[in-house]
Amino acid sequence: MSPPEPLVLVVDDEPQLRRFLRASLPAQGYRLLEAATGEEALREAAARAPDLVLLDLGLPDLDGVEVTRRLREWCAAPILVLSARDQEQDKIRALDAGADDYLTKPFGTGELLARMRAALRHVARGEAAEPVVATGDLRVDLASRKVTVGERDVRLTRTEYRLLALLARHAGKVLTHRQLLKEVWGPGAVDQTHYLRVYMGQLRHKIEADPAQPRYLLTETGVGYRLAAE
């Protein structure tokens, strides 16, 4: 017996976008719920327990960041923000409030579907349940603390490994500068963004075929970093 199709809650006050998603997502194996306001979204999420939430920030009643915070009090479903707001601070606020990813409108259907798949895979495997995270030729074995690219073993310092392992446990998810600094260097280092620039540069030189055009360790400009998911 095949598993049920993932249930996606679309929260957006634009009828055109909801119509577009209604036309495209079911053909890709998703069931849809729709809400045009934040309060309606919270009611639908409580009643129907969606597997994934697609959330606009500019809602007519509640700000999408507030909706994210309230959902995160009890809802573990991944939240993918879809918003016309392209300011870095908006992205950071949404991610720090508990969103898993952020896509700026207008976006391509292919990228949206890829990020949805990554978010659902992340939930399916659980953050600590998967001992090996693999993407392309990169493998991070969290149990043995071993990193390989193809057949090549990658030797990392303790801090480099902690940073890579954190990104691997959240593969496909954007982690903000503040989240990464707090987890790897501690709460006292949350403003030391130069630490990340230095260590991400070192990691890319050890892992990427072309550090200037990274395939695995991706920058979300002004916001943070993510490890590309398969």
Image (cartoon, rainbow, N blue to C red):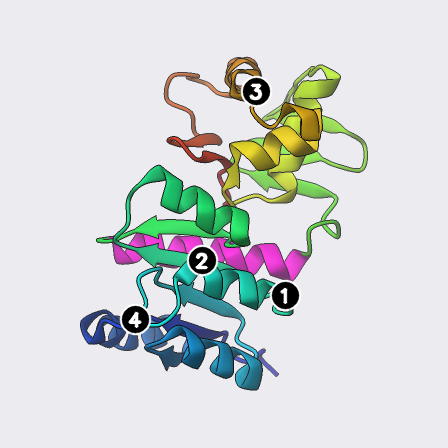
190 versus 11 height, above or below? above
Mark 3 or mark 1, earlier in chain: 1
- Residue 101 percent location from the top left of the image: 46, 50
Q: Residue at x 55, y 66 (%)?
A: 70
Circle 3 sits on which residue? 192
- Relative to 129, is 13 on the left or the right? left
Q: CA distance from mark 3 to mark 4?
A: 37 Å
In the image, the segment drawn in magenta is 107-125
- Residue 12 percent location from the top left of the image: 31, 70
Circle 2 sits on which residue? 65
Circle 2 residues within 10 Å: few <14, some 14–19, many ≥20: many
Can you tell which mark lies on residue 73? Answer: 1
Element under label 3? loop
- Residue type for callout 4: Pro
Mark 2 or mark 3, earlier in chain: 2
Q: Residue at x 28, y 50 (%)?
A: 85
- Residue type for callout 1: Glu
Q: CA distance from mark 1 to mark 2?
A: 13 Å
Circle 1 residues within 10 Å: few <14, some 14–19, many ≥20: few
Relative depth, front residue between 192 and 121: 192
